[in-house]
Amino acid sequence: MADASMNRKIMKTEKPLSEQVAFKEKLAYGMGDAATAFSAVSVGSFSMYYFTDYVGVSAVLLGSVLLFTRIFDAVTNILMGYVVDRTNTKDGKARPWVKWMILPMFIALVLVFAIPRGMGTGPTIAYITVIINIYYLVYTMSNIPFGTLGTVVSRDPQVRSELNLIRMLGYFAINIILSFTTLWMVGIFGDGHHGNRGWIITMVIYGIIMSIIFWFTYSMTTERVKPVAESTVENGEKEKPLPLGKSLVLLFKNKYWILIFIIMILTWILVNLFGGINVYYAAHILHKPGHVGILNFAFTGALLVGFLCVSFVFRKIGRRRTIFIGLLVIVVSSLAMLLNPTNIWFLGVLLVFRGLGFAPLMGSAYAMLADVIDYGEWKNGIRNEGVTYSGGTFSTTVGSGLASAGIGYVIGLAGYVYEKGATQPESVLTAIKSLYIVAPAVVAVILMIMFYFYNLDLFNEKIAADLKQGKFASDSTSQNRGE
């Protein structure tokens, strides 16, 4: 491939796009993550409980399955990002995949909660391994394009922040709803023998709603952002897209991508600790499985309120400082739970603080990833948002896998009894408390250290302005960025 700096043809400077993105379109994009939540929350928050307490699978074996699955999923994230970058249709590169994967997502969600019973340990584990890998492959083929879509709706930092905010509001609003409705619906539609019927009917209902919302997202969004530099060859034809190897090399030339990679691993470990252990805590520490809704509402309700406030706080004291303060709140509120870990109202108050503390980080995650994509284009002269975005979500997959597998390993090795309603030994209760209370505080401290080094928010608006004017890091006019 010829040197990009010699072959690029600079496009004319575009007007800011913020006024061209109507609220209806922002809502349509954000609601796509509400659709995602019907699948992601169901599997992330309830599948392990379903596998252990309804199917009767060992948590240790399940942890191994989930770790392998998420490693496989992480690899397919990168490959799917590469596929998105090479997709070229009249609908764009990302939107068509949102449409194409609606039916596969519906089917995959239902299959996860339709595991045949009575097959024996080996066949059951093998069956779960196949089904859960199919699910995550389909999820990746839907979620990577959806996330990439958010980076090509607009280049304007404010619009991106609004898209991310609405996206997070949609996801966590559904998270709250599902935390109250899922076990209740399973009980209503169940056959009275703790079988699969209640789970299957519940997931069919969720899948129908999910499919309708995804169609709304596809129908009402537009891809606007094009690469500032168009690579050309001597005959004037467009050069072929970058090979996967060169795309990956560009990732590792982007120092902020490396930092956001680690930050997002840790962030999604927190997400899965907050969600994945809730049902176990309610069932075995509070002895009331239905309290999972109260726990989730206190945390996620505060998180949603925090999302509505973070933009204002960001403007006052900056994104990185706000995130740092929020992480400190997580540490303090989490450790305070040790004072009275079985009082639902005491926990609820502290979970409100934990949710408010998590809002700045969670509300910024995908916006920071979009900023990293712009930085990579500005630094290297080449925009490959599909691979860059999927590289970021690779880290979320790794974080989710580590948390899910970790939960399985910890409670399994502690002696978890695999029977619905069983009394757990003290070692298991201690393990559940540690995962719910102490582990999030430890992860938050590590994140505070990482944000000491992540300072892209100090100049990302200037980078966006440079790109709108066709300027890159190699240009003499852009050498005052501290790079």
Image (cartoon, rainbow, N blue to C red):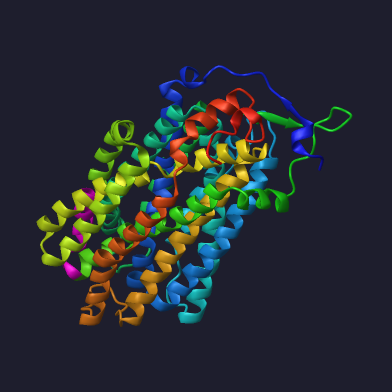
Res. 103 image quadrant: top right
Q: Is residue 440 visible?
A: yes
| Image quadrant containing the N terminus | top right
Image location of residue 340, percent across then percent down: 11, 65
| Count of number-bearing discs | 0
| Residue drawn 53% across the image and 69% down it | 68
In the rendered image, the vertical position of residue 230 relative to residue 47, given as above or below: above
> Seen in the image, is 86 located left or right of residue 291?
right
Q: Nearer the viewer, residue 97 or 383?
A: 383
Q: Residue at x 47, y 74 (%)?
A: 64
User: Which is nearer the eye, 53 or 259?
Assistant: 259
Residue at 58% x, 24% y is 468
Most foreground residue, 272 or 439: 439
| Type of secondary structure dominating the magenta stretch | helix
Q: Which residues are magenta?
A: 285-299
Check if residue 335 falls in the magenta segment: no
Image coords of residue 52 (percent x, y): 36, 72
Task: Give the x, y percent position of residue 345.
Answer: 10, 55
Quarter containing the C terminus? top right
Q: Nearer the viewer, residue 252 or 36?
A: 252
Compared to residue 318, the image places residue 175 above or below, namely below
Q: Residue at x 49, y 35 (%)?
A: 460
Is residue 184 in view? no
Question: Residue reaching furthest right?
Answer: 235
Which quarter of the figure has residue 46?
bottom left
